[in-house]
């Protein structure tokens, strides 16, 4: 995707209805080990925010704090705030299960539920939240979600096949369909293309550009070209000698890649390390 | 849906680019972070199931302690010096002990080890060091089938093979039955342990010009010693508790006997004979014998753990 | 690598293949012979049992042996169907009672228990498997039997007896030595088997499956029910079937509480019964004729075949899960 298209979509997405996020002084721990320290940054609504950095910099840990998935690890905890609009998802009266309902996630490795059909994979989240939906309502949601994930034409004749029967790229789009079926506000993507071939990767990238029309997207990637192609804002994380990850720089993607403010960012994007 | 639980994040409505509209006329931005009634119901179910699976675990742990507790409480009154030194009284009489059964069990296990261990360990060595391909897989499969054989079937086999042909129940028949039960257990565990010995150890020895068979005996087996002992003791503990095959082969004996061609006493068989008899004193003795049997099995495992641990300390 | 350059004087290096090669050949041959002996052992067991049961099949035919319920040594009529029924009924009760509890405990240990509690708890439950069958029998005769007779069975009869069809299961006088009591003790005995394998299988479920369900807004239980248990389904079925195999072959504990009385099939769980294993254990000493003896061996043969088939089935099921792709762990 050319530079021009990025700017085009950026302006178009300006009036997107999805909720944005604001991270304030967020730190993540595994037991006593500090993995991510004191990150503050926005996740702009209706935009794609890329998180880049060398492996081990805590970007995956960080994104998993944004839907309270991190705390499922034994001994893991989080301090600080992550606001969804004006509501802190770490507030004591907020239930993490509801947070994950509103902030969905797509993972590094496609993880469709192998014992469910394609159809059941898509409605898995709907069935949790709303047990009594008519068959026609569910059919409609399945079609809409699979179209939203650009998978409908490929699977519409085999909705009863196992989700595991699809190719890797199709599986990942099925996971995206499953995520958007529950109509979240934010979709978190943790290196969604790292297990895919270039063609499947291209399709996912195209899809991301479409998805931000309706959802706020945060994307972890180790691929700088990918970040430059699909994101509007970029955050660069790094773990130096301290071993914990920290936010080095955040800004519009174009600025990060052309006029980085920090020497460390420049070193990274010019390939001097990592 | 109760209105006060709904946190409105934003008043905007999202433009519909997807086919069709949602069922509710509500703003798609209605963000429910605390949850509605249905969500509280789902949370309650989740909590209930957590309690249920925890209760399943408590049951599993409790039933063990209940059974062990009964054996201890009912068995302790039976234990006195005579219990360990004397032979059982004739049918219906009070007093006596289970000394022949204790000695018989130990003797039977020892003979079973003598018969079964060489075969089992050699097979394990073959599987781990030499076997490649189908024959090895076939042997492993057969070992699994032997392990899954009901012990009463082993009893019937030895009964027809030895007892009927020799015309007499005998300690030897019992030991053969126990050996058949031990062989698959030992062969499986020892093969697994030998597979854990790093290849670098074998190569180091082979590089010194030591032949393969000496490498196995002098390097591989010693390195796996603690694991082999554990596997053997596991099998001994299992064999020591076997009743059905012994009932059909050694039969049991009220007297001291160390002639392998004669019926021999064994603790599990003694428990059975005491338990099914209609005398309260014998029932107490059954519990006492059960306590002794469990203690022997427990001691055996504890001793092994201790032996294995001290050996590891020496190595390191 | 040995250097084979010529050395001055008589060589001290021995490249004599036979010296070590012979030892290797002998040793390998010996171990291979042991492996063959194990194959032979199973072969001999099967052949001997078939050979020794020839008299009964010659006497009355396989069909009458397997599918009639008259077991009358005096008139030399041997039908084992009631024994097969007793075996299947008591084992199924054991399986139905044990599986939910065992899987529940496995789920608790894998999904809920704090890490310091995991190993002690599963070790304790697995200790149940180390208790000899005779001790279960002793406990069942003196503790479980009376509890069943005076509390559980009257309760079941009072509340379920009047219900049509279901009530038929609870007819007769509660005596505490019947198919139901045998089923309960079997349930306790196969609990550790099913629990241990289910736990193993549940730990094989990749975390990505759990995370996928969590990220849709599922509660903890919905994650388990929707993602974890379906993924582990085949393995749990295998665990249950291995438990069933153990129940079917179990002898002493069952023999001591199942009553060993009836050769008729009434359908009531309060009826004393016989299992194949308990019939062997109770009657082998009375086998005073060739045909009677042969009938007892034939029961063992049937038991062997059933146990073998079930074991193979269970292993196939457990294998399907373990062979599948594994989870990827994540480091940010």
Image: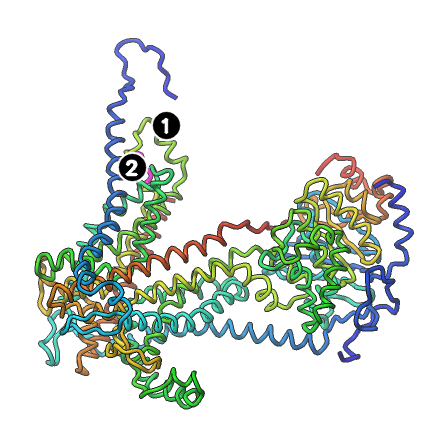
Residue C88 highlighted magenta (yes or no): no
SS state under label 2? helix
Residue B218 highlighted magenta (yes or no): yes
Q: Residue A53: x, y in percent?
A: 73, 44
The kind of secondary structure the magenta stretch mainly shows is helix
Q: Are marks 2 and 1 on the same chain?
A: yes
The residue wearing badge 2 is B218
For the point 27% across and 16% down, the residue is: C12
Q: Which residues are magenta?
A: B214-220
For the point 28% across and 53% down, the residue is: B232
Q: Residue A143: x, y in percent?
A: 74, 59
Mark 2, residues whose alpha carbon is within 10 Å: few (<14), some, or many (≥20)?
few
Name the outermost residue toward the top: C8
Q: Is residue B107 visible?
A: no
The residue wearing badge 1 is B207
How many marks overall?
2
Comes first in the chain, label 2 or label 1: 1
């Amino acid at each position: 995707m050319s530079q021009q298209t990025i700017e085009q979509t950026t302006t178009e997405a300006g009036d997107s209805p999805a909720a944005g996020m604001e991270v304030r002084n967020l730190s993540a721990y595994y037991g006593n080990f500090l993995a991510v320290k004191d990150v503050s940054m926005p996740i702009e609504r209706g935009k794609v925010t890329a998180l880049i950095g060398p492996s081990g910099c805590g970007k995956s840990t960080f994104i998993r704090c944004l839907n309270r998935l991190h705390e499922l690890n034994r001994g893991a905890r989080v301090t600080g705030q992550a606001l969804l609009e004006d509501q802190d998802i770490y507030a004591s009266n907020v239930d993490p299960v509801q947070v994950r309902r509103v902030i969905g996630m797509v993972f590094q490795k496609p993880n469709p539920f192998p014992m469910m059909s394609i159809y059941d994979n898509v409605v898995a989240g709907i069935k949790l939240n709303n047990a009594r939906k008519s068959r026609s309502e569910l059919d409609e949601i399945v079609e809409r979600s699979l179209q939203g994930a650009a998978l409908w034409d490929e699977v519409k004749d085999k909705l009863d096949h196992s989700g595991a029967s699809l190719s890797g790229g199709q599986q990942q789009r099925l996971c995206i369909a499953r995520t958007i079926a529950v109509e979240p506000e934010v979709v978190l993507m943790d290196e969604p293309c790292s297990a895919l071939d270039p063609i499947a990767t291209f399709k996912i990238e195209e899809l991301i550009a479409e998805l931000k029309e309706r959802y706020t997207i945060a994307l972890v990637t180790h691929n700088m070209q990918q970040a430059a192609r699909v994101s509007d804002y970029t955050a660069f994380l790094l773990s130096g000698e301290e071993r914990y990850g920290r936010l080095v720089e955040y800004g519009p993607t174009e600025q990060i890649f052309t006029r980085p403010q920090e020497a460390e960012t420049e070193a990274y994007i010019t390939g001097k390390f990592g | 849906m109760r209105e006060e639980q709904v946190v409105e994040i934003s008043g905007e409505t999202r433009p519909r680019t997807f086919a069709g509209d949602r069922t509710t006329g509500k703003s798609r931005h209605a963000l429910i972070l605390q949850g509605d009634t249905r969500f509280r119901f789902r949370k309650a179910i989740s909590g209930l199931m957590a309690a249920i699976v925890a209760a399943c675990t408590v049951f599993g742990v409790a039933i063990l302690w209940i059974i062990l507790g009964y054996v201890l409480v009912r068995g302790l009154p039976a234990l006195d010096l005579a219990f360990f030194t004397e032979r059982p009284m004739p049918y219906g009489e009070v007093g006596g002990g289970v000394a022949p059964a204790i000695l018989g069990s130990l003797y039977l296990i020892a003979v079973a080890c003598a018969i079964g261990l060489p075969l089992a360990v050699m097979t394990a060595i073959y599987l781990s060091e030499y076997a490649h391909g189908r024959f090895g897989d076939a042997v492993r499969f057969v070992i699994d089938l032997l392990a899954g054989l009901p012990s009463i079937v082993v009893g019937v086999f030895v009964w027809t093979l030895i007892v009927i042909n020799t015309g007499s129940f005998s300690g030897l028949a019992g030991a053969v039955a126990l050996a058949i039960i031990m062989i698959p257990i030992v062969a499986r565990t020892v093969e697994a342990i030998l597979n854990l010995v790093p290849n670098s150890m074998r190569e180091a020895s082979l590089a010194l010009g030591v032949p393969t068979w000496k490498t196995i005996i002098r390097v591989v087996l010693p390195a796996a010693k603690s694991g082999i002992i554990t596997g053997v003791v596991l099998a001994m503990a299992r064999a020591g508790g076997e009743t059905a095959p012994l009932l059909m082969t050694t039969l049991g004996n009220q007297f001291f006997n160390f002639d392998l061609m004669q019926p021999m006493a064994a603790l599990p068989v003694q428990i059975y004979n005491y338990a099914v008899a209609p005398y309260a004193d014998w029932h107490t003795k059954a519990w006492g014998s059960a306590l002794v049997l469990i203690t022997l099995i427990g001691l055996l495992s504890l001793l092994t753990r201790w032996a294995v641990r001290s050996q590891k300390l020496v190595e390191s | 690598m040995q250097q084979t350059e010529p050395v001055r004087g008589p060589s001290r290096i021995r490249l004599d293949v036979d010296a070590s090669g012979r030892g290797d050949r002998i040793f390998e041959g010996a171990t291979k012979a042991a492996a063959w002996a194990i194959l032979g052992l199973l072969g001999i067991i099967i052949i001997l049992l078939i050979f020794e049961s020839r008299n009964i099949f010659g006497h009355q035919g396989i069909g009458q042996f397997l599918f009639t319920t008259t077991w009358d040594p005096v008139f030399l009529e041997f039908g084992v169907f009631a024994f097969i029924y007793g075996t299947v009924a008591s084992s199924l009760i054991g399986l139905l009672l044990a599986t939910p509890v065992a899987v529940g405990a496995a789920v608790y240990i894998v999904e809920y228990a704090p890490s310091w509690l995991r190993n002690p708890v599963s070790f304790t439950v697995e200790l149940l498997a180390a208790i000899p069958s005779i001790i279960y029998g002793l406990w069942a005769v003196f503790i479980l039997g009376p509890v069943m007779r005076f509390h559980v069975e009257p309760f079941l009869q009072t509340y379920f007896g009047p219900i049509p069809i279901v009530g038929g299961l609870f007819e007769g006088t509660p005596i505490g030595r019947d198919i139901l009591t045998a089923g309960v003790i079997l349930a306790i005995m196969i609990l550790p088997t099913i629990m241990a394998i289910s736990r193993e299988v549940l730990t094989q479920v990749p975390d990505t499956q759990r995370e996928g369900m969590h990220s849709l807004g599922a509660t903890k239980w919905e994650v388990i029910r929707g993602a974890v248990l379906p993924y582990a389904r085949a393995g749990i079925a295998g665990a249950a079937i291995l438990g069933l195999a153990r129940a079917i072959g179990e002898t002493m504990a069952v023999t001591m509480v199942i009553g060993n009385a009836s050769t008729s099939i009434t359908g009531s769980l309060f009826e004393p019964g016989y299992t194949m294993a308990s019939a062997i254990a109770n009657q082998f000493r009375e086998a005073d004729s060739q045909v009677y003896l042969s009938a007892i061996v034939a029961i063992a043969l049937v038991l062997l075949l059933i146990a073998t088939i079930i074991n193979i089935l269970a292993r196939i099921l457990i294998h399907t899960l373990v062979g599948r792709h594994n989870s990827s762990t994540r480091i940010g």
